[in-house]
Image (tube, rainbow, N blue to C red):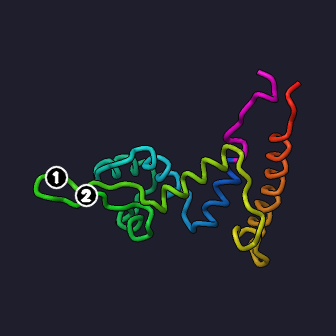
Amino acid sequence: MNAANLVDYLKYYRVIRHYFCAKYKITYPDLELLFFLYSEQYFSGADFVEYNELFSWQKGKLYRLIDDGWISVFRKKDGFKKTVYCVSHKGKVMMSSFYKKLSGEEISEEERNNPLFKRNVKYTDKVYRNMIKKMNQFTKQQRYLSPE
């Protein structure tokens, strides 16, 4: 496989992850948990606990994610039927956007759409901001490469 045909989805994963955590004010572990839950469609509290065991324990995490709008109750407990959860519309939109960015969609460089481009940000955010510029430039170049 030559370089023109190579698709490297994870090349800028760290940059995209940092951007999403800053934009949506979400932690890395919560984002990674949502990756798993996003593909599950529906899940029980037991399913949540089972996968969440991979992360540091945090009391009430499921309820915090519900309160923050990342997870919704799909069906409330009724008799012998368990409560069923799903990733909320807000979570689905974020995850879909994340995958689009991994696939080569550019990240906004405008201050109003990207908190990393605000004036008073930490040094680390400035480093990621510079990498976003390089990533967007690389993406544009890849898009316009002509087949040989």
- Residue drawn at x 79%, y 66% is 126
Position of 9 relative to 86 (above/below): above
Q: Is residue 27 left or right of residue 65?
A: right
Position of 138 relative to 116 (above/below): above
Please tell me which residue lies in front, 52 or 108. Answer: 108
- Residue drawn at x 16%, y 52% is 81
Please tell me which residue lies in front, 136 or 55. Answer: 136
Q: Which residue is mark 1?
A: 81
Q: CA distance from mark 1 to mark 2?
A: 9 Å
Question: Helix, strand or loop at disc 1?
Answer: loop
On whether residue 3 falls in the magenta region, the answer is yes
On whether residue 139 falls in the magenta region, the answer is no
Q: Position of residue 32 (x, y in %)?
A: 52, 51
Mark 1 vs 2: CB contact within 8 A: yes
- Residue drawn at x 85%, y 50% is 137
Q: What span is colored magenta in the figure?
A: 1-12
Q: Which residue is mark 2?
A: 75
Q: Position of residue 12 (x, y in %)?
A: 72, 47
Q: Where is residue 68, by image quadrant?
A: bottom left
As shown in the figure, which amino acid type bears the numbered disc 1?
Lys
As shown in the figure, which amino acid type bears the numbered disc 2?
Arg
Q: Earlier in the sequence, mark 1 or mark 2?
A: 2
